[in-house]
């Protein structure tokens, strides 16, 4: 058995899609285990750009199966649209399957997400408005609709009726918005179930059989630890567990089956949406990094907030995930921007110097990062393919991260294209 888990260590958009694509060439299974189409995972094959939202990024070159496991929340319409986009580019998708247990994002989830954000104005989370939070709420409240329900007309109708009774009353009385029609939604989702029925399977059985048969299985995380519902900057988080632990509940895999825990971090930090961001650069340099790094959301197109690398939060993320292999992406973006800073500690409101993350999101806004300054480099590194080809100061930057975290960097990404990697040790 060889299992690999790829997770984000910052606030999302670390380049998980690119790394999953690279690793999926040798994987027999690629599995998404949480989140939904709030994710935007970009892969460049030559000049051709693919953005995956719900489909595992392995869809591009995994020869085996791509699985959307039980922990994912699925918008069937978004799924079909994505399948059609991929097929229009000449790729096959008949190896993509969805768990019978996965919960379905319904139109009322998307509306609730949207209306709440509108209502909250300045204090809004800045969600992707894909209905992720409300869908997970219904799952936990035990009123959710699962993929399997789309295949059972009477159950589907009953569940839609029950849900709309409450949701329509909220739309009408609280938000003063139009209500939704049971019949319309029932017919639409029954038809979606009919269309997807051959792809809806018991994915936990498939995955555990693959584990028993010693297959190479890759689990692809969406979002990241700092957006984790428990360990992120609550409430400015997503509604799932994007940690390695999320694989166990989100795919039905025993903890003992997880081996290579790969954490992906950018060489700097970005965040899209609201919430604290201690090392944020709200200045010209931050804008430069945004432009050079192309830091605009793959799902919503929003400009990403940018800042220095934050080792305090990275240490927290590595601890919770148990990371044993690091990937640093976008090192090329830091070429030629002068001296570089890395946060190693925070100064709290009362002047205490700490090197651990806090559960107090409100206090975090007032924490001041303490930086170590490192020399930069001017060379273009996008063509480097071996570690020795990197400028000395770029190597020092990588080694500073490794020493602080006590974890080795196995891959350095130096460009968006599939082949732009420095692989220091083969994992497969
Ligand atoms: P994900 O959500 O973690 O998969 O990341 P996104 O795809 O949302 O954002 C990462 C962006 O950086 C994408 O546009 C990638 O094409 C790009 N990218 C990934 N790795 C590198 C890299 O090493 N250098 C540069 N310049 N871009 C990269
Ligand atoms: P990938 O997989 C970056 C952010 C949103 C918002 C918060 C909650 O591409 O890294 P949600 O719609 O999930 O309820 O929004 O989480 N967010 C992401 N930020 N990358 C993502 O995914 C994200 N998915 C959600 O911007 O702040
Ligand atoms: Mg993304």
Image: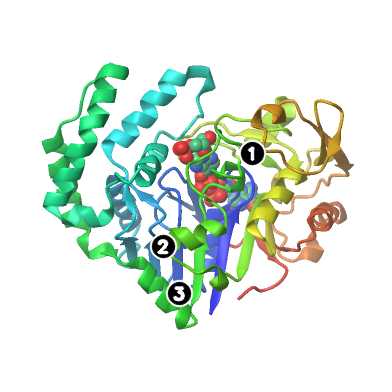
Please name which of the two marks, 3 or 2, marks the residue nearer to the observer.
3
Quadrant for residue 58, please give it.
bottom left
Q: Does the residue labelled 3 lie within 8 Å of ligand 1?
A: no
For label 1, the crowd category at 10 Å Cα-Cα, with few meaning under 14, some 14 to 19 and many 20 or more, is: many
Q: Residue visible at 36% across and 72% down? A: 205
The image shows residue 418 at horizontal and vertical percentages of: 56, 60
Q: Residue 403 carries which label?
A: none
The image shows residue 84 at horizontal and vertical percentages of: 29, 53
Q: Residue visible at 78% across and 38% down? A: 337
Reading the chain from its start, which is encountered first: label 3 or label 2? Answer: 3
Which element carries disc 3, helix, strand or loop? loop
Per the image, the residue denoted by label 1 is: 270
Rounded to the nearest angstrom, the CA distance separating label 3 from label 2 is: 11 Å
Asked if residue 329 shows in the view, the reply is no
Please name which of the two marks, 2 or 1, marks the residue nearer to the observer.
1
Q: 287 or 238, which is in the foreground?
A: 238
Q: 424 or 56, which is in the foreground?
A: 56
């Amino acid at each position: 058995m060889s299992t690999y888990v790829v997770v984000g260590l910052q606030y999302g958009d670390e380049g998980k899609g690119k790394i999953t694509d690279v690793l999926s060439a040798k994987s027999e299974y690629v599995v998404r285990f949480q989140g939904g189409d709030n994710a935007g995972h970009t892969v460049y094959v030559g000049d051709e750009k693919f953005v995956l939202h719900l489909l595992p990024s392995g869809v591009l070159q995994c020869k085996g199966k791509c699985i959307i496991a039980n922990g994912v929340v699925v918008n069937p319409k978004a799924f079909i649209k994505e399948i059609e986009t991929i097929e229009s580019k000449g790729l096959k998708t008949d190896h993509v399957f969805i768990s019978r247990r996965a919960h379905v994002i319904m139109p009322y989830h998307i509306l609730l997400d949207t209306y709440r954000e509108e209502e909250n104005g300045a204090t809004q989370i800045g969600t992707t408005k894909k209905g992720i939070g409300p869908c997970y709420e219904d799952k936990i409240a035990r009123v959710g609709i699962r993929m399997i329900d789309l295949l059972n007309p009477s159950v589907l109708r009953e569940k839609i009726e029950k849900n709309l009774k409450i949701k329509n009353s909220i739309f009408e009385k609280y938000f003063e918005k139009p209500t939704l029609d049971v019949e319309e939604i029932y017919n639409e989702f029954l038809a979606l179930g009919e269309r997807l029925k051959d792809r809806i399977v018991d994915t936990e059985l498939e995955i555990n059989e693959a584990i028993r048969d010693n297959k190479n299985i890759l689990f692809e995380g969406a979002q990241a630890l700092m957006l984790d519902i428990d360990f992120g900057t609550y409430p400015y988080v997503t509604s799932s567990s994007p940690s390695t632990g999320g694989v166990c509940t989100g795919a039905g895999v025993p903890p003992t089956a997880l081996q290579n825990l790969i954490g992906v971090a950018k060489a700097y930090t970005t965040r899209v949406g609201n919430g604290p961001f201690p090392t944020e650069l709200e200045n010209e340099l931050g804008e430069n990094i945004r432009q050079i790094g192309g830091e605009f959301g793959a799902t919503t197109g929003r400009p990403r907030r940018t800042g220095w690398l934050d080792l305090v939060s990275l240490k927290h993320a590595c601890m919770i995930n148990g990371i044993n292999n690091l990937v640093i992406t976008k090192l090329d973006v830091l070429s030629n921007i002068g001296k570089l800073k890395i946060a190693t500690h925070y100064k709290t409101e009362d002047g205490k110097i700490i090197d651990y993350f806090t559960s107090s999101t409100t206090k975090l806004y007032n924490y001041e990062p303490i930086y170590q300054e490192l020399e930069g480099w001017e060379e273009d590194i996008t063509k480097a393919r071996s570690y020795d080809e990197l400028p000395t100061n770029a190597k020092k930057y990588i080694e500073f991260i490794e020493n602080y975290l006590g974890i080795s960097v196995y891959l350095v990404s130096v460009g968006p294209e599939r082949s732009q990697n420095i692989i220091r040790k083969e994992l497969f």
